[in-house]
Amino acid sequence: MSESTQQFTPLRSVLYMPSSNERALEKAKSIPCDGLILDLEDAVAPEAKPAAREAACAAVASGEYGRRTVTIRVNGIGTEWHDADIAAASKAGPAAIVVPKVNSAAEVEQLVAAMEAAGAPAHTKLWAMIETPVAILDCLAIARASERLTAFVLGTNDLVKELYAEHVPGRAPILPSLHTALLAGRAAGIAVIDGVYNNVKDAEGFLAECEQGRQMGFDGKTLIHPGQVEGANEAFAPSEQAVADARGLIQAWEDGKGTGVVTYNGRMVENLHVESARRTLSIAESIAALQG
């Protein structure tokens, strides 16, 4: 099935929320983000992790987050909390379990087996965080390792650290890595979500990085502050003009069937353009449904 005929789930804005913070979990119910990552890892102190695990699972079970895609980020493979996190999250049944530092296809298979053993329902998918050099080099195998894996989440902070690179405007040091992850994700037919922007006070820089991510082909961006949601939602949504052009192009294609060369606004139209236009309309319609 081509992407243009699949049901599209908007993931323009995917907000990390610390599961140890009860007020944050409550506030998240009213934030207009497409997705939530209820975090048990970086945002939670070691002594708070068991309670955060319970809170995240309770939040998922509450059904109070509307149409948002609600996921749980567990602690990584090999940590003392990982097994209990996977077991609890699988039983809670979020939209996905997000796992940091997934480095191989074998680890994906291990994670999926653990989820299934813990009784994860079919709708609970696996999102793999790609944030190390070895993951970038093996990301196609990772992406194809299981049908349960439906998204890559780029961990750009860790990737910059592992490469001994620097955070700079435009992200030149990690562009090859971002492209590689995108290529693998698209080859496997999974979503690919961009990494976070660290300076929550730099709105201009954040919006520039959102635009870059959209131009590169990311489905959306992971966020660390509710104030970033609106900008990401706008950046990763088709503009009114793009939607109008998509409708016009499709109409021209339908009207011109069997007549030879089809043009729209002076440009030749081929099937690949029609597929792109249909994808644009699918995204726009899914976003409208999410807002409705």
Image (spheres, rainbow, N blue to C red):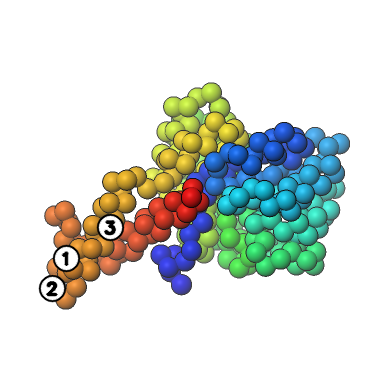
Tell us which disc is closer to us: 2 or 3.
3
Q: How far apart are marks 3 and 1 (CA)?
A: 15 Å
**Residue at image x 41%, y 65%?**
4
Circle 1: residue type: Val
- Left or right: residue 149 compared with residue 114: left
**Nearer the N terminus, badge 3 or badge 1?**
3
Circle 2: residue type: Thr
**Looking at the image, which is closer to me, 39 or 21?**
21
Up/down of 151 relative to 258, above or below = above
Up/down of 129 relative to 223, above or below = below
**Residue at image x 81%, y 58%?**
87
Q: Mark 1 points at which residue?
A: 262
Q: Residues within 10 Å of mark 3 (few under 14, many from 20)?
A: some
From the top left corner, tell me how far across and down residue 255 is, in percent.
18, 68
Q: How far apart are marks 2 and 3 (CA)?
A: 19 Å
- The numbered disc on residue 77 is none
Q: Mark 2 points at which residue?
A: 259
**Looking at the image, which is closer to me, 221 or 8?**
8
SS at badge 2: loop
From the top left corner, tell me how far across and down residue 182 is, in percent.
48, 53
Circle 3: residue type: Arg
SS at badge 3: helix
Can the viewer see residue 235?
A: yes
Q: Residues within 10 Å of mark 1 (few under 14, many from 20)?
A: some
Pointer 1 and pointer 2: residues touching (CB < 8 Å)? yes
Q: Name the residue under label 3.
A: 247
**Residue at image x 71%, y 66%?**
121
